[in-house]
Image (tube, rainbow, N blue to C red):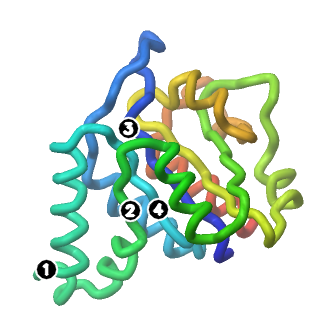
Amino acid sequence: MDNLYTALVHFPVVNKRQKPIGAALTTIDLHDIARASITFGVRGFYVITPYQDQADLAEQVIGHWTRGEGARLNPSRKQALELIRVTDTFETAVQQIQAEQNQPVVTIATSAQKHKKTISTHALKRKLVPDRSYVLIFGTAWGLADELMEMCDLRLDPIKGTGDYNHLSVRSAASIYLDRLING
């Protein structure tokens, strides 16, 4: 799909008390979500943080694997990390996608929390059309803040396991959602 994007939001997200916070960047999330994104044909992966030190860290990691020694040692990692774009706000990411694709962008929130207005990945797959771009939005910490969830066009059903425990790593959730959307 040349019109599908992923986004990893570090602000606004919530803590375990459901209070809005900004979360620190985790470099393994960059690697693993970029690798999942390229595996499933995603066009771009946005890392969203308003914190300059965190954006600088992301750029340093990306630079090492795309232009530095890591690029020479691991060309497949280079290819995956070339998908990453760092922005300070979610709105900026959506504007960049819209400018790149020259078409409307449908924003799709993910959450481990149940909500009355969610759709399945199967239903979403049936809605995908070529004259729109789509961005799957993942939250760090304890998930996306309500203010961002409310801005989104759609919400995906939570991923459910066999029991009550439901706190996957964001990189695991990204891989599962992408697989379900592309292959499911």
Disc 1: which residue = 68
Q: Are marks 2 and 4 in contact (CB under 8 Å)?
A: yes
Question: Residue drawn at (17%, 86%), measured in percent from left and top?
Answer: 73
Give, as a three-letter code, the residue at label 3: His
Q: How many C-alpha atoms fall within 10 Å of the one at disc 1: few (<14), some, or many (≥20)? A: some
N-terminal of the two: label 2 or label 3? 3
Question: Residue drawn at (55%, 54%), measured in percent from left and top?
Answer: 95
Disc 3: which residue = 10
Question: Residue drawn at (18%, 89%), measured in percent from left and top?
Answer: 72
Res. 45 mark: 4
Residue 157 versus residue 102 in the image, above or below: above
Disc 2: which residue = 85
Give the x, y percent position of residue 147: 57, 23
What kind of element bears circle 3? loop
What kind of element bears circle 4? strand
Answer with the quarter of the image where residue 53 lies: top left
N-terminal of the two: label 3 or label 4? 3
Residue 166 versus residue 50 in the image, above or below: above
